[in-house]
Image (spheres, rainbow, N blue to C red):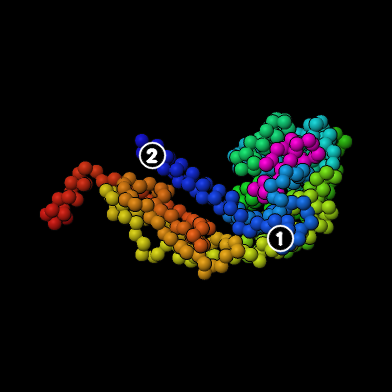
Amino acid sequence: MKILLKAVKHLLIGLLTVSLIAGIISNPIITYSAEGDPLDLKSRSAILMEASTGRIIYEKNADEMLRPASVTKIMTLLLTFEELDNNNMTYDDIVTVSEHAASMGGSQCFFEAGEEQTVRDMIKCIEVASGNDAAVAMAEHIAGSETEFVNMMNTRAKELGMNNTNFVNACGLEAENHLTTARDIAIMSRELITKHPEIKDFSTIWMDSIIHKTKRGESQFDLANTNKFLNQYTGATGLKTGFTSQAKYCMSATASRNGIELIAVIMGADTKEIRNSEACKLLDYGFSKCNIYNDTETLPIDLKIPVKNGTSKYVDYNNIINNQFVLVNESPDMVIKEITLYNNLEAPIYEGDTLGVVQYSVNGNLVHEEYIYAAENVEKLSYIQSLKGLLSKIFMIK
């Protein structure tokens, strides 16, 4: 029963957290119409997101469903890293290229049917060279077929709140109804870079190579990053470019400066130069609007959290030292901090139980929160211990 109650408690807290985060993400800080656009972007659609919070700094036609080209591969990579995290495969596992995967056109690494590569090298081929054949081979390795993998992609998209996305393939080649939006690309980009930061070990590679292993022998195949933006913007970390004649030039550009990480999505740019320059413009704008808030003493040093009917009168907690978060279009002196301890905490308390919350708000709007967790167990007093305590109070005995 104790375990069940604890699970329910954590579930409710988790749902509250998700609700609060969703509230932050769904409320853009700055939104401009085309007529009032201070950046005067020429691309058809764009959005700028602060990565740690998901808050929107700028958007233009961000919910228009458009063709994403190879930016599609962000979802393919996200599912790949989730499989790695879930121990369903390792970087050294072998991926065998099928005839279907080898038949992919567009950008490719020219794999032959039956060729084998490690998961690590396939990720490099997807991220660095934007190989359509590599993306489909990885999809088949994970799900058994590209069709089943696409079902996984669409299911994951719905889970992430990508409400205007429909994937038809794993690589981004032109297909009817293969559509998404700038907002949805930002959402999946955020999930990838925040939950799987190791993607940057691949997305920042400028030049590399793999070894083709076929019946004819071995040969080196050089990989050059398709994202030339990496060498054009200070702090650039990725993430994925795309182009087809119908989608035009697209990109999810990520960059980090001074502890602030931004995601700029461009869709439907007429030229590569416009795409890259407008991504730079978005990121420059975003970094000018963001500040780091640093709370060096999240909880007072003398704070005590009382517990009723416990073997200890107080419960120790995990203090939050040097709590940092990003403010968007706000200054640190506008932040109001409020510490809330849950009322009438009663033993038993278990390590990891939530004891309270520290909330930061600006103009009445929640911008960040941190939960206070128990650092120890506090057992409930037994009947004998309770009786002894009562007698001690009555007769002043020890």
Foreground mark, 1 or 2?
1
Which one is earlier in the sequence, the residue at label 1 or at label 2?
2
Q: Nearer the viewer, residue 231 or 49?
A: 49
Q: Residue furthest right?
A: 216
Report if residue 10 is visible in the image. yes
Q: Secondary structure at mark 2?
A: helix
Q: Secondary structure at mark 1?
A: loop
Residue under label 2: 5
Amino acid type at mark 2: Leu
Residue under label 1: 36
The percent position of residue 271, horizontal first and vertical second, equals: 84, 54
The percent position of residue 134, horizontal first and vertical second, equals: 77, 40
Q: Nearer the viewer, residue 137 or 272?
A: 272
- What residue span does the magenta drawing correspond to? 164-187
The percent position of residue 244, horizontal first and vertical second, equals: 83, 45
Quadrant housing residue 171: top right
Specify whether residue 247 is painted magenta.
Answer: no
Q: Residue at x 39, y 65 (%)?
A: 301
Quadrant housing residue 103: top right
Residue 69 lies, with reference to residue 292, above or below; the image says above
Q: Nearer the viewer, residue 144 or 156?
A: 156
- Quadrant of the image containing the C terminus: bottom left
- Quadrant of the image containing the N terminus: top left
Q: Residue furthest bottom?
A: 333
Left or right position of 37 against 10: right
Q: Residue at x 54, y 50 (%)?
A: 23
